[in-house]
Amino acid sequence: MSSAANLSDGRPDDPPPSHPGGHAHAHGTSGARPGLGRSDARALVLRILREPTRLRSLREAVYFVAVFPLTFVLLLLFGVGFMVAVPLSITVVGLPLLAGIVLVGRYQGALHRGIARVLLRQDVEGPRPFRSRPGAFGWLGSALGHIEGWRGVLFLGARLPVAILGIVATWMLWVFGLLLLTYPIWMKPTQLGDNGDGAGVNVGDNLMGSWYELIAVGIFGALLLLVAPWVIRAIAWVDVWLMRALLGPTKLSERVRDLEETRAIAVDDSAARLRRIERDLHDGAQARIVALAMHLSQAQERLDHDNADGGDAVDLAKARAHVDSALGNARIAITELRDLARGIHPPVLDQGLDAALATLASGSAVPVGLRTDIARRPPAALESIAYFCAAELLANAGRHSDATEILMDAERRGATLTVRVQDNGRGGARLREGGGLAGLAERVRTVDGTLLIDSPPGGPTRVTVELPVPDA
């Protein structure tokens, strides 16, 4: 498809984003990754040796030092709260108390997500907002049935074993590792008594006190410190996984949120279309029709005036001039109305998407190679979206890409309608807020479609629109 400059109304030198949003994806190309060489092995060894000294490793250790007591205390408080609220649920205060505990279970999740964001640099998305039904009983029912609140309480119970494992690993690996690493310093042979007793590391009944035993203990401590960051990081990964599963949005809430966003986009798009239609009618066809009426009225007045003055002496030249001007305005108004109707629903789509795309290709300023394979026609709404996406992509490629050739193909495979446009331009296409590609991405999202961009610098650029076709 088209290039950075080409497809996205953007500047060709701008680098593509690291990740797009929504359902649109931008892809670059990369070569095959070489095997692990000597330099890679050296870098891996250096990373392992340096990992205990990195700030990230310290943050992960501090994370479990913080979350273990927090989880334990919160779980204890929730346990006491349920022990009080459940027996009282047969009274007036029991159910409101239980509902309040459930809501606290929801909001305490924000604390855990905040700690993970600060110490682990992991951003866990929060659940959908709590929405209460009207009235006291509506609030009570909404709170008691609030799934996110119950999941927040469940998270504490599921997280406790992980927090215990994390704090134990932190203590055993970091603290013991440091103690054993420095063992040769603080445990000197001179500290041993005459009978060989003293304070230090014991293996069985033997105190590790000889010089080679001191070195062995120090090496073992160093190994513990080298292993510590990786073990604690693995435990932290499990903790974040639990957090995403129980404190993040559910698939249903994500779907609801996505539908709300696409509905808002569709409403805004419809409002913008209506404003454009109103503006085009007001400034174009309406003005032409008003001028048409004025010229016809003037011609009528001229005919009536000439008849009143001279009977049959009619100034045909002036009347013809008014009629010719009115006819010209009528033709222009008809053309503008046709263009306006074509922007709402192109008549060529009545012949099918393949015919409509062929018309687009024939009118492109850049030569277009077209291939279509649409055995069964998709719904009219999807055909319209696919048509306008193809038109926008062809226009962008012609304006921005410096391409000399465009390839476009459209096919329907099962429940997916795919339109793909590729050009040999300069590449670098990207999603940019307010740009043409961003508008296309929003349009295809309204029907759960996706916009895929593959546009490395230097080209070629390929943009793929995939639209799900509902079952007939």
Image (cartoon, rainbow, N blue to C red):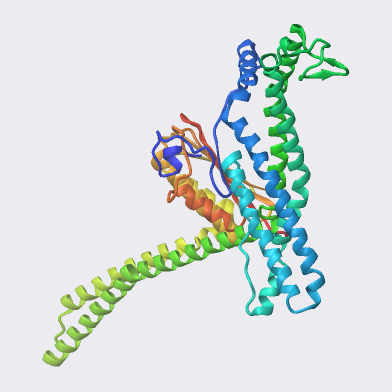
| Residue shown at 56% from the left, 52% from the top | 355
Q: Nearer the viewer, residue 189 or 284?
A: 189
**Residue 353 locus on image (x, y percent):** 58, 54
Residue at the right extreme, as displayed? 205
**Residue 408 locus on image (x, y percent):** 54, 42
| Residue shown at 68% from the left, 39% from the top | 64
Depicted 73 relative to depicted 175: above or below: below
Residue at the front extreme, as displayed? 194
Depicted 344 relative to depicted 405: above or below: below
**Residue 51 locus on image (x, y percent):** 62, 24
Asked whether the viewer can see residue 472, the reply is no
**Residue 58 locus on image (x, y percent):** 61, 32
Q: Nearer the viewer, residue 306 or 70?
A: 70
Q: What is the number of callouts on the image? A: 0
Q: Is residue 349 left or right of residue 45?
A: left
Q: Quadrant of residue 253?
A: bottom right
Q: Nearer the viewer, residue 284 or 443?
A: 443
| Residue shown at 59% from the left, 61% from the top | 381
Q: Nearer the viewer, residue 266 or 237?
A: 237
Depicted 22 relative to depicted 90: above or below: above
Locate the C terminus by quadrant: bottom right
Asked whether the viewer can see residue 81, the reply is yes
Q: Is residue 25 left or right of residue 472?
A: left
Q: Quadrant of residue 314?
A: bottom left
| Residue shown at 28% from the left, 75% from the top | 292
